[in-house]
Image (tube, rainbow, N blue to C red):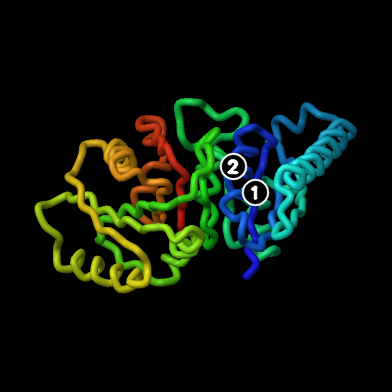
Amino acid sequence: MKKNILFPTDFSDNAWSAIVYALKLYAEVECKFYFLHSTKMSVSTMSNFSNKLLKVMSENAMKELVELKTMAEVSNANANHEFEIILSPHDIETAVKSSIKKHQIDLMVMGTKGATGAKEFFFGSNTVRIIKKVKGCPILVIPDEFNFAPPKQIAFPTDYTRFYDDKELRPLKDLADLFDSKILPVCILSKDKLTDIQEYNMSMLKNYLEHYNTSFHFMPNYTKKTDEINDFITLLEVDMLAMINYKHSFIESIIKEPIIKKIGFHPIIPFLVISE
């Protein structure tokens, strides 16, 4: 079944790095890739430009999109893949939401930071805004200059306090199907043992993943969850991280200001964010 994949791009090296990763990830899958660029600027910035200059900037952005499409076609040369460009006058969140609906997007792929992203933070401001605002479409975030390696092991951090349904787990399963990946649910223990609810949720997760190669893990509670997850990634040689973003989830906590400024979450591998 053909996949529709969206690349929001600011034409940075970081955005190109994410595109290259996704083209390799889906090398054996029939895909239509959409390159999306938003030309919308803040009102204060726009007031400093004439209409003529704004038109020139829009034309230049279109030219860059065409060049990006050509570059992808030349570097990729894959008969399974086709490309389309979208230039939007709307802000990035609106442009993304509209594209997801119009083109029935299955997955969005982004770099970790934009052209002006602060180097000490994993998430750039555009990425944070999109994760917060966009629901119903999984987002795969690729660390800057990350070299592609097949995701043979996918970690799925969970505390089992919440029940996951099969629909929420579908993006995780779809990615696992690409390379017959092993799924590693990992629970960060806050107490000595699981409650009855946690036990039930874990047993249901096992049922949903029964046809997949899985390995269930537990880790002691660190002071900093971010250190813990990165330790787990290193220890078990994990290639990708997948989490469901819901109210009071780990992802929600790390993308809230000012927490993101305090902890600077740095996954060292691609990170799949699944919205509830």
Q: Is residue 45 left or right of residue 24?
A: right
Mark closer to the chain start, 2 or 1: 1
Badge 1 is on which residue? 7
Which three-letter amino acid code belongs to the residue tagged 2? Ala
Q: Which residue is found at the position 25% from the left and 61% from the top?
A: 161
Asked whether the viewer can see residue 74, the reply is yes
Tell me the quadrant of the picture where the C terminus can be found: bottom left
Q: Which mark is residue 18?
A: 2
Label 2 secondary element? helix
Tell me the tag on residue 123.
none
The percent coordinates of residue 105 (x first, y second) are 63, 61
169 or 58, which is in the foreground? 169
Q: Is residue 24 above or below residue 261?
A: below
Tell me the residue at 63%/44% (across/down): 19
Identify the residue at the far left of this view: 192
Relative to 86, residue 57 above or below: above
Q: Residue at x 69, y 55 (%)?
A: 33
Q: Is residue 152 above or below residue 145?
A: below
Q: Quadrant of residue 57?
A: top right
Q: Amino acid at mark 1?
A: Phe
Q: Is residue 235 left or right of residue 153?
A: left
Q: Nearer the viewer, residue 48 or 184?
A: 184
The quadrant in which the N terminus is found is bottom right
Residue 214 appears at what percent x and percent y? 31, 62
Nearer the viewer's eye, disc 2 or disc 1?
Answer: 2
Query: Disc 2 vs disc 1: Cβ atoms closer than 8 Å?
Result: yes
